[in-house]
Amino acid sequence: MALRFFNTYSRRLEEFQPLDPNGRAVKMYTCGPTVYSFAHIGNFRAYLFEDLFQRHLELRGYEVDRVMNITDVDDKTIRGCAAAGVPLAQFTQQFKDAFFADLTTLRIKRARTYPEATNQRHIATMLAMIETLIARALAYQAEDKSVYFRIKKFPGYGKLAHFNLDELQSTGRVKNDEYDKEHVGDFALWKAWDEADGDVRWESPWGPGRPGWHIECSAMATEILGNQLDIHCGGVDNIFPHHEAEIAQTEGCTGQRFVRYWLHCAHLLVDGQKMSKSLGNFYTLRDVLAKGYSGREVRYALLRVHYRAQLNFTWEGMLEARQALARIDDWLARLRERIASVSLADSESPQAGRMLDFEEALDDDLNISAALGFLFESIRETNRALDGKELSASEARAWLEWWKRIDTVLALTAEENGTPADVAALGDARAQARLAKDWRKSDELRDQIAALGYEVRDGKDGQKIAKRGRV
Ligand code: AMP
Ligand code: ZN
């Protein structure tokens, strides 16, 4: 069966066909974090959906080249560094470090590169794009010295978000005091410097200032991946104005279709409302780890619902994730035991039937709930066969091989040496404490881990945890 995904642009399920004439290479761009505070687990729902997407494409033989940007200059980062009284780069560094530590904790595969908006080379690309847009009358400098995109001049503005210009209202992402604009929906490409920006400024043909958020992504995506991408992802709140603006800017410069497939994940909710920093109803990963959960459990809890369905975050949901993983761990242990024991008859050959269902469910717009349904049905059936001593060692081996294959997508295997969930959770919390240079907390957590009979050793690629005497 061909892979098919729901394209926000057409509002349809479309068969997946990359631009590469050999049908193998896939160019994927994913909008990354704005590093003015710790990412919350709503953000990580988006990044985990993208991780699932990349991993499934790779399972299906595609070679995915993924880029994720880091927004390290915008209103919020500037406000943050001013309040902290430190330079912008110093202010954002701590949140960049935390972000990468969180990716590791959640087992999110690294993108090829994480370009940063403040990199001089990318700023130069942004300036060049803005110049092109002005030359084509798609942008203008207003009296406030900022440069704006002229949305009325771009045919098709609103096609991704599916609305027409007359419905356009000013949104939270648009500054209210931009009264110099020709149209309320015109968005800033270059924001003129003002006193509140302090020493955050770059020179430009239009005077000192800084880039707008949208042009950052257009510039970094095309500079690194080329003018045309296969896939662009984000959360649904990115559709407008951010991705709509990216299309207008990029296509306004290149005259080519920017992205073939736009995929957006629905929000993570808390008590029925979007989890967001502005509402104050958010949990960071470290908040959840501090309650004794591991990164693996958070990964499962955020992955298990279809990306286009909203997911309500609850502590019961976290408990369910723990139980589901315990079932998987227990099943794998039983399979290994069965393989090790030679006393039972070993003649039947394994059945492949259900093994394909998992992948086919993901082929169908990443239907993870159906895929997990097949997994747990398989676990139930094999457990029954094991109970009745009816599962041959070769069947058990085939199931284990199958697990290894699907786990390249799920990334849910327990830590080596069978580290129990509570020890793994303490380990994840300790890794976070070390990152925050909280040595006292790190030592406390080491003691708690030791009290459970495990030892930690810190190495070049992070910490290793094993049963005491086995590190
Ligand atoms: P931001 O740092 O706000 O630009 O967000 C980074 C990514 O997280 C974007 O792809 C957002 O769409 C996504 N995002 C933000 N809040 C949520 C949420 N509650 N649920 C899912 N994704 C979210
Ligand atoms: Zn972006």
Image (tube, rainbow, N blue to C red):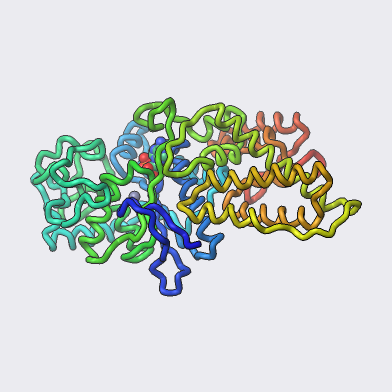
All told, the count of numbered labels is 0
Residue 371 in sight here: yes
Residue at 46% over, 46% down: 47
**Position of residue 244 measured from the top left corner of the image (x, y, whole percent):** 26, 50
49 left or right of 291 in image: left
**Residue at left offset 52%, top offset 30%:** 287
452 relative to 373, above or below: above
- In this rendered view, identify the residue nearer to me: 275 or 146: 275
Task: Give the camera-side residue of 347 and 277.
Answer: 347
Figure check: 173 above or below 249 = above
Report the residue at 55% width, 36% height from top: 437
- In the rendered view, does 407 fall on the left or right side of 132? right
When the figure is inspected, residue 347 is found, relative to residue 290, above or below; the finding is below
Residue drawn where x is 50% and y is 48% of the image: 367
Residue placed farthest to the right in the image? 343
Q: Is residue 118 visible?
A: no
**Percent x, y for residue 317?**
55, 31
In the picture, measured across the screen, residue 145 lies left or right of residue 158, that is: left
**Residue 53 rendering spot, x and y as whole percentages:** 48, 53
Observer-nearest of 265 and 100: 265
Residue 471 at x, y percent in the picture: 77, 45
